[in-house]
């Protein structure tokens, strides 16, 4: 596995990773976005096989046993993991691949593929992060509280990242991400 480039995007829930990645992919259409597996329930509008592969806990644990993930972690009380085979195929084909995963997963990927570049998307402040999470309106109060509680530890991990992009203004931050992705 080693010809293409691999970028890992992380950041606290609500920082705007999905927003920036979607916009950057419009500028950089040749980049392949990895589709993760998760045991969390689909949000309204999320499609199985497009946004995530939605698995049961049994199916997910089965895939772990079969070494089907390049990395996996428990994030906010659910399993999330990156299927290995598509990553191997893309890198062998020389493609640039983007993973949007949490900080635990990012460090697992870096151990296996030291050439991976780590990109952290940070909110301008924790107050703004909370506003965005609530504004998105996709999570219950309990889930929002858990995601905010995890944000501080995630922000700490940004020290280890190659790039930190503060998502203050969407247009500006998108351009910065596209520059980092060199497309
Ligand atoms: P993540 O993928 O990191 O959880 P999202 O991309 O879903 O975050 O963004 C969370 C919410 O914040 C969404 O409602 C999104 O529209 C909004 N948002 C994203 N970037 C910005 C920004 N720069 N300024 C204001 N709101 C933003
Ligand atoms: P969400 O439930 O909001 O889609 O994602 C919650 C968190 O899980 C985010 O921090 C996201 O980056 C992370 N995540 C999504 N897919 C993966 C994955 O495949 N592996 C890991 N480790 N984290 C993931």
Image (tube, rainbow, N blue to C red):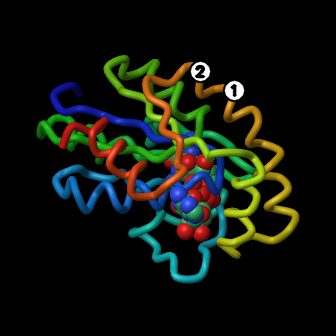
- Screen quadrant of the C terminus: top left
- Screen quadrant of the N terminus: top left
Please give the name of the residue rendered at 61% of the width and 32% of the height, measured from the top-left corner.
104
In the rendered image, the residue lying farthest to the bottom is: 45
Q: Is residue 11 left or right of residue 161?
A: right
What x and y, as percent, mark residue 61? 61, 48
Cβ–Cβ under 8 Å for marks 2 and 1: yes
What label sits on residue 159 in the rendered view?
2
Classify mark 1 as within 8 Å of ligand 2 or not, answering yes or no.
no
The vertical placement of 19 against 156, above or below, is below
The vertical placement of 42 against 154, above or below, is below
Describe the element under mark 1 as helix, strand or loop. Answer: helix
Residue count near mark 1 (Cα–Cα under 10 Å), binned few <14, some 14–19, many ≥20: few
The vertical placement of 58 against 91, above or below, is below
Question: Which residue position holds label 1?
Answer: 156
What x and y, as percent, mark residue 168? 54, 50
Describe the element under mark 2 as helix, strand or loop. Answer: helix
Classify mark 2 as within 8 Å of ligand 2 or not, answering yes or no.
no
Residue count near mark 2 (Cα–Cα under 10 Å), binned few <14, some 14–19, many ≥20: few
Please give the name of the residue rendered at 47% of the width and 63% of the height, measured from the top-left corner.
53
């Amino acid at each position: 596995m080693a010809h293409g480039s691999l970028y890992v995007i992380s950041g606290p829930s609500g920082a705007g990773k999905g927003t920036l990645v979607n916009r950057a992919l419009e500028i950089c259409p040749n980049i392949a976005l990895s589709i993760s597996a998760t045991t969390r329930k689909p949000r309204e509008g999320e499609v199985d096989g497009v946004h995530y592969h939605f698995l049961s806990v049994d199916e997910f644990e089965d895939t772990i046993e079969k070494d089907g993930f390049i990395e996996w972690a428990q994030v906010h009380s659910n399993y999330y993991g990156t299927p290995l085979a598509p990553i191997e195929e893309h890198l062998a084909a020389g493609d640039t691949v983007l993973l949007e995963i949490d900080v635990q997963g990012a460090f697992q990927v870096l151990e296996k593929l030291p050439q991976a570049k780590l990109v952290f998307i940070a909110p301008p402040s924790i107050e703004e992060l909370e506003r965005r999470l609530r504004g998105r309106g996709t999570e219950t109060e309990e889930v929002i509280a858990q995601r905010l509680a995890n944000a501080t530890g995630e922000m700490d991990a940004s020290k280890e990242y190659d790039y930190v992009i503060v998502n203050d203004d969407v247009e500006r931050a998108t351009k910065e991400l596209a520059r980092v992705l060199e497309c």
